[in-house]
Image (cartoon, rainbow, N blue to C red):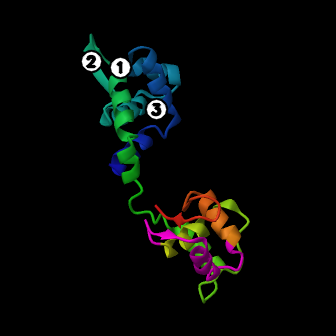
Amino acid sequence: MSDEIITFFKAFADANRLKIVGLLAQQPYSVEELATLLNLKPSTVSHHLARLAQIGLVSAKTESYYNVYQLDEKALQSKSRDLFSQDNLAAAVVDVDTGAYDNKVVKDYLRKDGSLKTIPAQRKKLEAILRHVVKAFKVGKRYSEKQVNEILNGYHEDTASLRRELVGFGLMKREGGGGEYWRE
């Protein structure tokens, strides 16, 4: 589906094609009329119309001696809705390593022994570190504050900050002040 999205954007990646779509959104035109309006050669306009027809946005009908082109607004709306659906947009990035940023940040902030050199001040970097640290806790298991501190101490001596940030970012839940902690 990402090829279809690319083809769609390539069709609109030309200012004259955008102008043609804009004009056809108002009313149907012949090649000659469009060429005159846009100050282009008819062969150039025909080329642009062919690209737009290729993706199903324009169609031609014969009137007297001319082919008159019109925009298929329903096709434009339908294609836009289909191409930009959540599933299709997600499919466009299947080959992207979404963990690359986190991996880089973790590599930059961790010592060889797995402890943190420092707790990042930048929120994005802090969040990446916290996503790494939270993996030390089993999903669904409840931990006392003492157990949490023991685990976090392996990362940094400021266990209170790490604990607070894990809860603040929603990566762990806490029950009462000093109560149990868990990862959902």
CB-based contact (under 8 Å), mark 1 and mark 2: yes
- Separation of residues labelled 3 and 2 (CA atoms): 19 Å
Dot 3 corresponds to which residue? 17
Q: Is residue 74 above or below residue 99?
A: above
CB-based contact (under 8 Å), mark 3 and mark 2: no
Dot 2 corresponds to which residue? 61
Q: Is residue 120 above or below residue 2?
A: below
Give whichever of 173, 3 is nearer the camera: 173
What amino acid type should be assigned to the residue bearing mark 3? Arg
Residue 14: where, in percent of width, then height? 49, 38
What amino acid type should be assigned to the residue bearing mark 1? Gln
At a point 32% along the width and 27% down the height, the residue shown is 75
Dot 1 corresponds to which residue? 70
Residue 93: where, in percent of width, then height? 42, 56
Give whichever of 183, 176 is nearer the camera: 176
Query: Disc 3 on helix, strand or loop?
Result: helix
Residue 126 visible in image: no
147 within the magenta span: yes
Give the residues drawn in magenta, as a range: 138-159
Give whichever of 121, 5 is nearer the camera: 121
At a point 37% along the width and 34% down the height, the residue shown is 81
| Side (left or right) of 170 relative to 89 | right
Earlier sequence position, callout 1 versus callout 3: 3
Residue 1 visible in image: yes
Residue 92: where, in percent of width, then height? 39, 53
Residue 65: where, in percent of width, then height? 28, 13
